[in-house]
Amino acid sequence: MNMAESSAARLQMLINRAQRLNTEAARPQVVENQDDDDFLSGFQHFRRSHESRRAGSSRKKKKPMYSFKVTCLDSPEYQTINPTIVKAMNEKQLGYRPIKIERSATINKLTEKVMSIFKFTCAFKYMKAVRNTINICELKELQVTSTKDVKSKIGRSNLYILPAEKIGQSSPEESSDESGSSLPNPHLDAIPQRRSRLCHRNNVRTSLV
């Protein structure tokens, strides 16, 4: 083998070695890049699952119910409302009641719930109080077709129920029997009896004298 062939062989050997070194150097880089890709994909999956759970928890926090503050009146004559009337309704067990109902409920369901809570069966109107003066509010009828309509128009204000006929318990001053006379009062009835006994005793003493 002459000198030229020897040099060519040595050069080829150096080239082969350089290629092997490059291959060995590139192999860990591929593995490292694959590890980076796996880490990034895993992190992205974790973030997506975390955001999904957070979105699910926020959906659960939303109230599926409508809340109403309801006061029922005892007759259809009311056109205004004031603190004195509200106090009288409270005394008749028709005052403020909190009512909760599903958002998907129909207006008929809300109507049935109102009748059940206040224990009456006649027709009624949904009313809203609109302030006229400091202590007096005018009652305005709500034109509604759904529970959502009622909530959107009443908001956080009180919802008033105006029945088509007189309902509720009568006050003690209004209590009377079917003939229209006042109910007997045992304390008042006892007074004449005591006076008659006293007069009888005085008559007896006088006759003895």
Image (spheres, rainbow, N blue to C red):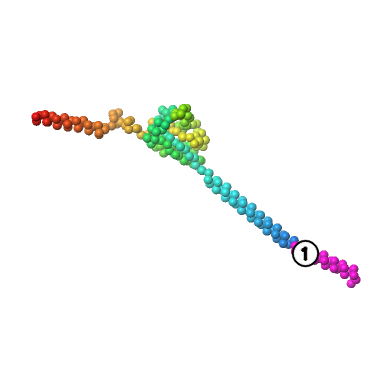
Residue at (68% x, 58% y) in the render: 35
The boundaries of the magenta stretch are 1-25
Instruction: Relative to 79, say whether 50 is above or below.
Output: below
Instruction: For the N terminus, give its image quadrant.
Output: bottom right
Position of residue 10 in the picture relative to residue 41 (left or right): right
In the image, residue 146 lies at what x, y percent?
A: 50, 36
- In the picture as drawn, the residue positioned furthest to the left comes out as 209
Residue at (75% x, 61% y) in the render: 26
Callout 1 secondary element? helix
Mark 1 Cα shell of 10 Å, populated few (<14), some (14-19), many (≥20): few
Residue at (38% x, 31% y) in the render: 166
- Name the kind of residue labelled 1 in the image: Leu
Residue at (13% x, 29% y) in the render: 203
Position of residue 58 in the picture relative to residue 68 (left or right): right
- The secondary structure that dominates the magenta segment is helix
Queried whether the magenta region covers residue 15, the answer comes back as yes
In the image, residue 150 lies at what x, y percent?
A: 50, 35
- In the picture as drawn, the residue positioned furthest to the front comes out as 209
In the image, residue 98 lies at what x, y percent?
A: 44, 39
For the residue pair 209 and 8, the one nearer the viewer reads as: 209
The picture quadrant where one finds residue 9 is bottom right
For the residue pair 58 and 162, the one nearer the viewer reads as: 58
The picture quadrant where one finds residue 115 is top left
